[in-house]
Amino acid sequence: MESAIRVLRDHGLRKTSIRIKVIDLLSSANHAVSQPDLEQQLESEADRVTIYRTLKSLEEKGVVHKILDMAGLSKYALCKDECTDHQHKDEHLHFHCQVCGNIFCLNIPGLPDYNLPAGYSIKQMHLSAEGVCVSCSKG
Amino acid sequence: MESAIRVLRDHGLRKTSIRIKVIDLLSSANHAVSQPDLEQQLESEADRVTIYRTLKSLEEKGVVHKILDMAGLSKYALCKDECTDHQHKDEHLHFHCQVCGNIFCLNIPGLPDYNLPAGYSIKQMHLSAEGVCVSCSKG
DNA sequence: ATTACAAATGCAACTCAGTTGCAGGTGCAA
DNA sequence: TTGCACCTGCAACTGAGTTGCATTTGTAAT
């Protein structure tokens, strides 16, 4: 649980109790987490606006990355070490479970190149999938 | 402009003036369109709630498909003929322009298969890209 | 054509995610 | 330990999307 403090220091962010709690919650979840999720888990430990701003800071410094769920709700997951400020190396697949609604970051081999119509220049590719996750396929 | 009427008939939807206008607007745009876009273009010709319900009906009957932009806003584009009720054959790439914010549906060859961790079963894959579109790269 | 009913529309009011401004509190470097 | 930038909490707001209900309209059967 000391790792949250190191994460903050390494990314040039001030050490505050709310940031530590948010990072700990994100790292103990195996799926992406939304602001409403955090607001509920933090109960009265943090103001709702502060949670929004905390997530924004963490994203800007490359600690977390944002994923939109199927309904357009923002969810957040910790980045791998390779991510730096604003340059999120997103070499993984976002798996959206149709049953529990959770989003899981899964490793994939590199994306293939596609030939697009002339004039379109690609800066970043995103691959996502819908289906049923491990826990929901048991049971 | 008669094609909107045929689209409605072919998909078992009643012919109403608002639906025709919405379909015409969608087919004349070369990019995906949001409810706020339509609300502005239809001015006082349709109630805002009706536009939401129109888009929902069109989506349910396989006339349009929904795409979320980078901010989580729902945008809609006409489906190709292969789409049927609720079974959207999404064999194309959604290109999000970082300059104008528009989303374009581009054809791509079939998606590759990926080996996921055991237990995850994929129902549908989605490929998207960020970059600069044709119009924005000129200029 | 007329009718009758389901489906579509308009209006008002609502929910909920996310934002902004500002006053007061806190981390941290000097 | 002091100073100041940054963080937090509160209140108020914005804007997308939804729901309930009364009214109107499309369409199929007469």
Image: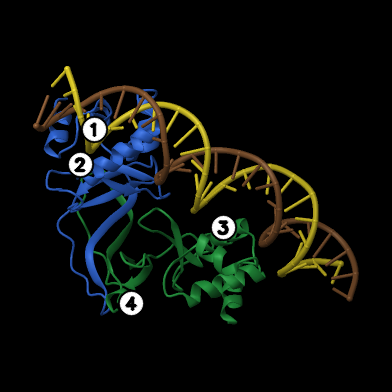
Chain colours: A blue, B green, C brown, D yellow
Secondary structure at numbered mark 4: helix
Contact check, label 1 and label 4, Cβ < 8 Å? no
Q: CA distance from mark 3 to mark 2?
A: 37 Å
Label 3 and label 2 in one chain = no
Q: Nearer the viewer, residue A11 or B23?
A: A11
Alpha carbon of mark 4 to alpha carbon of mark 3: how far? 29 Å
Q: Which residue is mark 4?
A: B135
Q: Which residue is mark 3?
A: B52
Image height of C13 relative to B122, above or below: above
**Which one is nearer the viewer's eye here, A45 or A92?**
A45
- Binning the other alpha carbons within 10 Å of mark 1 as few (below 14), some (14 to 19) or many (20 upward) gives many
Location of mark 1 (residue) = A23
The alpha-carbon separation of the residues under discs 1 and 4 comes to 41 Å
Check whether the beta carbons of the residues at disc 3 and disc 1 lie within 8 A of each other: no
Chain of the residue under label 1? A
The amino acid beneath tag 1 is: Ile
Let me know if residue B54 appears in the view.
Answer: yes
- Return the chain for callout 2: A
Horizontal and vertical percent position of residue A96: 33, 47
Sequence order check: which comes first, mark 1 or mark 2? 1
> Which element type, helix, strand or loop, lies under badge 2?
loop
